[in-house]
Image (cartoon, rainbow, N blue to C red):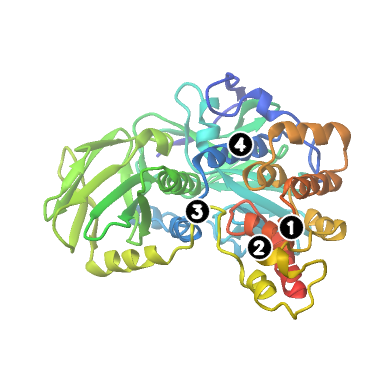
Amino acid sequence: MVAHMAHYGETTQLNDGNGDVSPSDLKDQPAESSHSSSDDTSAEESSEEEEAHEEEEEGDSDSNTRSSVEKPSDEQLQPCCEKCRALKNPKYELVSPRKLSKERLLLKLDAEGVYECSDTGLVFEVSQRVSITYCVLSWSKFSTYLTGSWKFAGPIFDVECDPSILKSVQFPHSLCLADKDNEVKFSVLHVKNSRGQIEPSADHSGSHVKWTVSSLSPVGPIVQTSKSAEHHGVVQVFKEVGHENSFSFRVYLAGNNCSDIKDIRRAVRRANNCKNNKKYIHVDKPPTCMLEENRKYRLISEPMGHITPEDMLFTPVIVEVKGYFEVFFEESPPFKLSLTDADSGQTVWTATIREGDCVHHLDENPRKPVKGRKRPISTSEEDLCNKPNKKARGIDESDCAGTAPAPGLTDQQLMQVAKRMGKEWKIVAICYLGLSKQDLEEMESAEEDVTMLKFNMLERWRRRQPKGSAGIQELHKSLKDNDDVPNEVIAVLDEMLRNNS
């Protein structure tokens, strides 16, 4: 496969009102890092805000269902392609990142060198000791920046670091480069100043596209090919749960990259939040296979099940456009699923779903907690009511007819939480604490310090709670088990709960 590097060129600007990131969404946000360059935008932050609004509209998901959807990790899966394994790809020192939240990672590098993230496959070249934070983004927010024959070739990331120290980034791609007749031109899409800028790649290998850092904002590898390319792909299977003796599945096809896998997870989470009482859980089966662009694939089963659609065209577009196979069996497992080339009949992937796969998931469903925020009175509150001789400041027995009001969070406690909030604080405010975009705009017009903005956000939440419902436990309940909330925030609230008890 012959590969070339692209020249600089701008893509078209995103139009307003198309459901993706618009220029108005990419307005500057308060800076939290002294290393951010002047042309960096908050595209990723705006993208996350859109998702926060979507999740708010979809409704809350119970913790068991959420954890079930997390099973198909965002991590890059090992390719199954023997042809690519034969290519000589560089090997770098593997390093494991620390999770700041379920979406954001932190890598602390101690010296100059080239390092590969064990979770995402990103390769960083640094000139000295440095800390790098990064997260996987969704192409659904950025794919409309691409024009002509440009297609995304791997995951898109938001990376935060001092660009004078971070010399280059290598992005994993999903293309198979074994076909020597296919001319390939790699590049990267760099979203900055409300526009998508096409910048040339510095080099490429059978697994990565190298980019010399100019500035840091959302960046991902893109490609042009002379003919349809073969991709390292994944097949993800989800089973509907909650109905005994019901054997219904969703089967997704995607490229083997973190962004596509994240989009599948999000699509399933949205399905779980719909008001049709359907819940899906991941069935862990060998996922990798080879998928060719613009080729139709057919899912067949033994015994014969009801499968729609009959064929699916694999294209390098976002998961929402590709859709999924829906499979229903009237019989009991085991079921053998096989993905075949619709034209040649060649099998590219197969898996067997056994009775244990289904029974295990059905047993998990009844144990999930009560949905929503209307939960039974907590143990500590029951103790206050059932033990009148226990000294509870400001509470008498007449208060115990309902729920005993918990002590409110102090300003000092709110500040402890605020200091541990990251750039996701606006998402937390809207999605989990019930604040509106207008609330945030009002606070930003009156205060510039980012830490004080986070404190004011928490203080506004506290003021709006009913009497006795603005304590540590209530804040903890609102924030826990949510992807966007940093682990440090939950940890400090856990410590406060232990000290309070």
Sequence-wise, the earlier of marks 3 and 4 is: 4
Residue receiving disc 1: 468
Q: Nearer the viewer, mark 1 or mark 2?
A: 2
Residue 65 picture quarter: bottom left
Residue 250 horizontal/vertical position (percent):
30, 48
Picture layout, residue 448 above or below residue 383: above
Q: What residue type is labelled 1?
A: Gly
Whole-number angstrom distance, CA of label 1 to CA of label 3: 40 Å
Whole-number angstrom distance, CA of label 4 to CA of label 1: 35 Å
Residue 257 horizontal/vertical position (percent):
46, 48
Residue receiving disc 3: 74
| Left or right: 377, with 312 as reference point | right
Q: Nearer the viewer, mark 3 or mark 2?
A: 2
* The label number, if any, that marks residue 403 in the structure image: 2
* The label number, if any, that marks residue 151 in the structure image: none
Whole-number angstrom distance, CA of label 3 to CA of label 4: 17 Å
